[in-house]
C-alpha cells in the first residue's frame, strides 16, 4: 500500500515539477557535482563552506607535521637504540622535562585548533534572521519543501525514482528538466530555488525515520528527526546548480533521495516564485 501511494504521488507531481523547473536548470552552470577522478571538496559556494575547508586544511597540516615527527622519532630510536648498538638497556624510569613537554605541547596544539574551530562552529549554529525560510521534511524516500512565508510547497523526487539503471525514458526526463545523463541519481524533478546572496534558513525534520539534509558545497548538514525541528542556514554566493544527498541511513532507497538546489539571480527567483505559487500552492 505504501509503495502504491508513493508511485501515485510521484506520477502526479513529476510532470508539473519538470515543467516548472526546466527553464531555470537550462540557464545555470552545474557547480556542486562530483567529478570523476578528482579528490577533495566541491567548490565552496558559501562563507561557511570556505571556513570549513580552510579549517580542514589547517588541521590536516598540523596532523601531517605531528605524524612526520613521530615517524622520525621512531626511526631515530630504532636506529640509535637497537640491541646491536646498546646490548645493555638503560635503567632510568622517567624524564620529568620530557614528560612535561609531551603533556603541554598537545594541550597547546588543541587550544590552537579550538581557537579556530569554535568560531566556525558558532557561526554554523547561531541561526540568523532568514530572508527566506524553508521547511524541509525527509520521507522514505524523497524530500518535501515548504516556503514558509510564500505559500509554496512541493515534493522533490529523484528523476528516475524507482529505476535502478539509466534508460531512454529517464534520459528523456533528464533532458526535459535541463540535465544530462551525467546527472542521473543527482537531479530531482523539483529543485529548491533560492536567490544568490540571500540568507536562507532551512527548518529540517523527518516524517518517518531520521534523514539528513546535506549540501557539501554550502558546508551544511543537519539531521531531520521525526518530532523535532532543527535548523541550518546558508547564503550562497554563486549562481549555479548544486547537488546534495540524504546523509543518514534511512532504509533501502536511502541512496536514491538526492537534493537539488538552484541558486539564481533575484530577478529569476522572483519570476520562479510567481510561477511556483500557481504550480505548487501550499
Image (cartoon, rainbow, N blue to C red):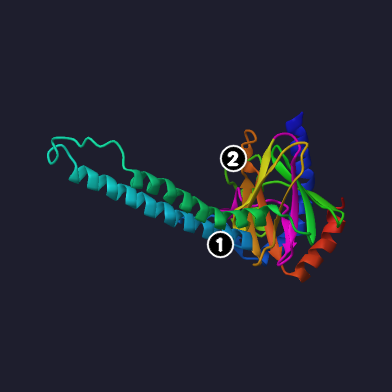
Asked whether, in this view, residue 229 is left or right of residue 73, the answer is right
Q: Which residues are magenta?
A: 181-209
Q: Which residue is mark 1?
A: 43
Q: Is residue 163 above or below residue 233?
A: above
Q: Nearer the viewer, mark 1 or mark 2?
A: 1
Number of dots carrying numbers: 2
Q: Which mark is residue 103?
A: none
> 175 or 101: which is nearer to us?
101
Image coords of residue 128 (percent x, y)? 75, 58
Which badge, 1 or 2, comes first in the chain's sequence? 1
Q: Which residue is mark 2?
A: 164
- In which quadrant of the rendered image does the N terminus lie? top right
Q: Quadrant of residue 44?
A: bottom right
Secondary structure beneath label 1: loop
Image coords of residue 132 (percent x, y)? 79, 59
> 85 or 205: which is nearer to us?
85
The residue drawn where x is 60% and y is 48% is 185
Dot 2, how many residues are within 10 Å of its Cα: few (below 14), some (14-19), or many (20+)? few
Asked whether, in this view, residue 253 is left or right of residue 130, the answer is left
State yes or no: residue 35 in magenta.
no
Image coords of residue 221 (percent x, y)? 64, 49
Amino acid at each position: 500500500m505504501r509503495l502504491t501511494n508513493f508511485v501515485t504521488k510521484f506520477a502526479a507531481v513529476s510532470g508539473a515539477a519538470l515543467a516548472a523547473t526546466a527553464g531555470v536548470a537550462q540557464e545555470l552552470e552545474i557547480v556542486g557535482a562530483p567529478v570523476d577522478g578528482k579528490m577533495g571538496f566541491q567548490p565552496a559556494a558559501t562563507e561557511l563552506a570556505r571556513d570549513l575547508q580552510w579549517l580542514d586544511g589547517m588541521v590536516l597540516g598540523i596532523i601531517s607535521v605531528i605524524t612526520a615527527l613521530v615517524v622520525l622519532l621512531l626511526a631515530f630510536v630504532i636506529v640509535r637504540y637497537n640491541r646491536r648498538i646498546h646490548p645493555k638497556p638503560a635503567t632510568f624510569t622517567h624524564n620529568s622535562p620530557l614528560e612535561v613537554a609531551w603533556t603541554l605541547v598537545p594541550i597547546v596544539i588543541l587550544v590552537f585548533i579550538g581557537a579556530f574551530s569554535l568560531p566556525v562552529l558558532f557561526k554554523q549554529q547561531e541561526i540568523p534572521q532568514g530572508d527566506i525560510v524553508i521547511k524541509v521534511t525527509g520521507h522514505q524516500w524523497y524530500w518535501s519543501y515548504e516556503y514558509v512565508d510564500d505559500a509554496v510547497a512541493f515534493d522533490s523526487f529523484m528523476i528516475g525514482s524507482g529505476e535502478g539503471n539509466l534508460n531512454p525514458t529517464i534520459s528523456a526526463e533528464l533532458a526535459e528538466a535541463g540535465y544530462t545523463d551525467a546527472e542521473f541519481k543527482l537531479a530531482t524533478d523539483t529543485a529548491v530555488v533560492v536567490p544568490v546572496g540571500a540568507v536562507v534558513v532551512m527548518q529540517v525534520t523527518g516524517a518517518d525515520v531520521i534523514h539528513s539534509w546535506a549540501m557539501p558545497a554550502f558546508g551544511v548538514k543537519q539531521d531531520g528527526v521525526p518530532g523535532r525541528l532543527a535548523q541550518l542556514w546558508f547564503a550562497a554566493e554563486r549562481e549555479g546548480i548544486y547537488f546534495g544527498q540524504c546523509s543518514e541511513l534511512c532504509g533501502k532507497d536511502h541512496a536514491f533521495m538526492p537534493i537539488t538546489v538552484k541558486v539564481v539571480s533575484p530577478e529569476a527567483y522572483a519570476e520562479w516564485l510567481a510561477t511556483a505559487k500557481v504550480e505548487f500552492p501550499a
